[in-house]
Image (cartoon, rainbow, N blue to C red):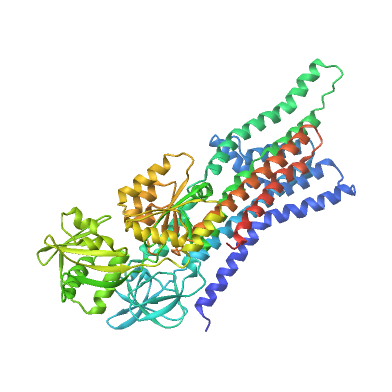
Amino acid sequence: MGCNCCNQTIDDHSKKEKARFRIYLPASISLVMIIVGVLLGHFGLFDTKIVAFIWYLIAYLPVGFPVLKEAVESTMHRDFFNEFTLMSIATIGAFCIGEYPEGVAVMLFYSIGELFQARAVGKAERNIRALLDVRPETATVYRDGIPVKIHPRQVCVGETIEVKVGERVPLDGHMIDEQAFFNTAALTGESVPRTIRKGEEVWAGMIVNDRVVRIQVDKPYDQSALSRILTLVQEATERKAPVELFIRKFARIYTPIVTGLAVLIVLVPFVWSLFAADFIFVWSDWFYRSLVFLVISCPCALVVSIPLGYFGGIGAASRAGILFKGSNYLDGITKINTVVFDKTGTLTNGTFEVQRVQGLSWGDEQQLLQWIGSAEQQSNHPIARAIARYVEAEGVALLPVTRATEIAGFGLRATIAEREVLVGNLLLLVREGITVPEQLQAISETIVACAVDGEYRGYLLVSDSPKTDALQAIEDLQSLNIANIQILSGDKQTIVTTLANRLGVAQAYGNLLPEDKVKHIEQLKADPNNRIAFVGDGINDAPVLALSHIGIAMGGLGSDAAIETADIVLQTDQPSRIATAIRIGRMTRRIVWQNIGLAFAVKFIVLLLGAGGIATLWEAVFADVGVALLAILNAIRIQRKEF
């Protein structure tokens, strides 16, 4: 008995082969017929002109009819000046003056160009889909202690799923087992396996490398990190770069102008012949020149290759774990000359560790940990997570929280056991009028202070470290001639200055609230020469990300608010990818302008030759379809390059 899934695969392959055959069949028929027709004509085997006309008409219809149909439909919608109309007029005109092979050739090569274009675009789309849409169709979920295979959409938040070695994780969640190695290449572009430990996040699309793991689901199917990536990439094609928008507007003006010039190529010599007795007007010659002019004028190379260039850039960036939300941002990042970093979670790991617990007196540490741990248990801030890990390791029992309010840039206010608890930086306590020991001001490390019912109760000392590629990120940006690099942080100035000196950043500002960061960016924007990219990860970075010319968010550690607000998302959380994003943007822009220059140069030369009667329809075909093919091949180069 045959395997149904194998049969289905064979059927799908057979359908694809038939579809591919149907796509290439019209062009193949026309190509064979035009070659045979040219040979028959060369050896004088066409008995009459009507036989040649019928032969070439049959050759014309497979490739010409779809274009003629599009031209009629466009005209009915009052879109008179487009490539379909121009091709139709030019080829019908060629038949009218007896240039049958050239009339067929124009349509044939135009169709071949369209096939190449469709193939290039399809390949780019498939590359991105294959790269990103790696969600498995089934998930093994434990229900009543029994493993059940169902579609990931049917798995509820809080349920436990099992993923075997080599399988992809179907849903976002956190590790239940102690640790495992995961391949994150589809999400982050990183080839090195990543170690994920108990309680840490696991994303849909990761591949388990070394052991069977159990994961508790945190998000439904449609809200996973992978779903967000797919949405961002799909939406990216809808946001056009200024060059794309300009070319579209230009084509609407350019096409009717050259159409008018094509008419004048016939009309002006005719009028001149009425007044100049020594000038003989030959209708077929000047009409042929007009047709050449029309074919050359098609803006196919521009209209096709420019969007394809940006699409290729977005795909190349996605492979590197960089998500551009539109080609306008791919274009915009090439103009950046100022990069401003948030500190925690951006240039540093954001994985804090508690170094010291200091209560008011000896023996108060357990009580202090209970207050702070209980208040921070609802927060997703990296410092809060570090405290939660430490409190759990110490075996401290948490108290129920009846109310908790986050004060951006300061900390938390919570009601615990009917007592008001403040947990945050020293500025929070000072703002609330609470007296703190003077010696705390001299501590350079990060402090999480606590007050209960208006009285200072102690602090935790936590530390963070720079990311392994933070120094490389700064050096790479400097190598790209971006000299104005700054750090903004809510941490103490001494901490920020220490990090800046370590990384070689000249300008670093600490003790900043979210509104202070906004003011700083506004001051930078006051100078029109500054084109600013801000890089952040926290919810309090969202206003600054929105205000800067280009907002870049960390996609792993970053908050949902930061990721939604940003223009670019770094899935790897690596600041060094900013330089990669700029290089991809610059190469994409270079390719786009190469295509524009190539198209205009070739078209201008052949337009002049066509108007002078030197160029034929064969040269016109090259100037249109040939240049479009060269531009497409140039545009897809970026998809093959490693960054």
Residue 489 vs residue 557, the one in the foreground: 489
| Rendering coords of residue 415 (x, y %) | 14, 62
Q: Position of residue 69 (x, y in %)?
A: 61, 43
Residue extending farthest top: 275
Q: Which residue lies furthest to the left in this view?
A: 418
Q: Given the current orientation, which residue lies at the most extreme right position? A: 43
Residue drawn at point x = 26 percent, y = 60 percent: 441
Q: Which of 318 and 131 is in front in this view?
A: 318
Q: Residue 39 or 260: which is nearer the viewer?
A: 260
Q: Is residue 157 visible?
A: no
The percent position of residue 71, horizontal first and vertical second, equals 61, 40
Residue 258 appears in the rendering: yes
Quarter residue 640 falls in:
bottom right
Quadrant position of residue 345: bottom left
**Relative height, residue 469 to residue 307 (above, below):** below
Relative placement, left or right, of 82 versus 199 is: right
Q: Residue at x 82, y 36 (%)?
A: 614
Between residue 241 and residue 359, name the one nearer to us: 359
Q: Which residue is drawn at 85% across and 42% down?
A: 48
Q: How many marks are shown on the rendered structure?
A: 0
On the image, which quarter does residue 135 sit in?
bottom left
Quadrant location, the C terminus: bottom right
Whole-percent x and y of residue 523? Answer: 39, 42
